[in-house]
């Protein structure tokens, strides 16, 4: 059965990227976001978490447990 991780927008740096640290299968990815990028390279304003490799998720639930913002949900 395939599982799907859904991640709401969060302040990833504030929690120390806990979900990335516990996911041993590398399902989740921190994606840089720059709100005021006018075509110039610049440091990202923040990072958001994207479930880039959902197909590898084994539904262990660790990322859901450690998220302080309840931003992650697991769907079958
Ligand atoms: S449920 Fe487990 S395998 Fe799936 S993304 Fe979360 S930590 Fe990774
Ligand atoms: S989804 Fe939750 S655990 Fe992951 S970075 Fe955001 S706040 Fe932290």
Image (tube, grey):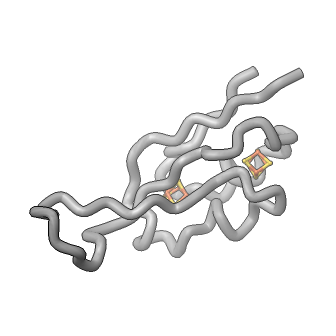
Residue found 71% across the figure and 51% down from its top: 27
Q: Nearer the viewer, residue 43 or 17?
A: 43
Q: In the rendered image, which quarter contains the N terminus?
A: top right
Residue 23 percent coordinates (x, y) = 76, 59
Residue 74, image quadrant: top right
Is 27 situated left or right of 11 in this image?
right
Q: Which of 19 and 40 is in front in this view?
A: 40
Q: In the rendered image, which quarter contains the C terminus?
A: top right
Q: Is residue 43 above or below residue 57?
A: below
- The outermost residue toward the bottom is 43
Residue 56 percent coordinates (x, y) = 82, 43
Is 69 situated left or right of 25 in this image?
left
Residue found 42% across the figure and 56% down from its top: 48
Q: Is residue 13 above or below residue 4?
A: below
Residue 44 percent coordinates (x, y) = 30, 71
Residue found 80% across the figure and 42% down from its top: 57
Counting labels gives 0
Residue 7 percent coordinates (x, y) = 52, 41
Residue found 65% across the figure and 64% down from its top: 20
């Amino acid at each position: 059965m395939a599982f799907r991780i859904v991640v709401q927008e969060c302040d990833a740096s504030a929690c120390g990227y806990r979900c990335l640290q516990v996911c041993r299968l590398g399902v989740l990815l921190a994606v840089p976001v720059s709100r005021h990028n006018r075509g110039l390279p610049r440091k990202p304003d923040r990072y958001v978490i994207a479930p880039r490799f959902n197909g590898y998720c084994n539904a262990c639930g660790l990322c859901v447990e450690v998220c302080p913002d309840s931003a992650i949900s697991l769907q079958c």
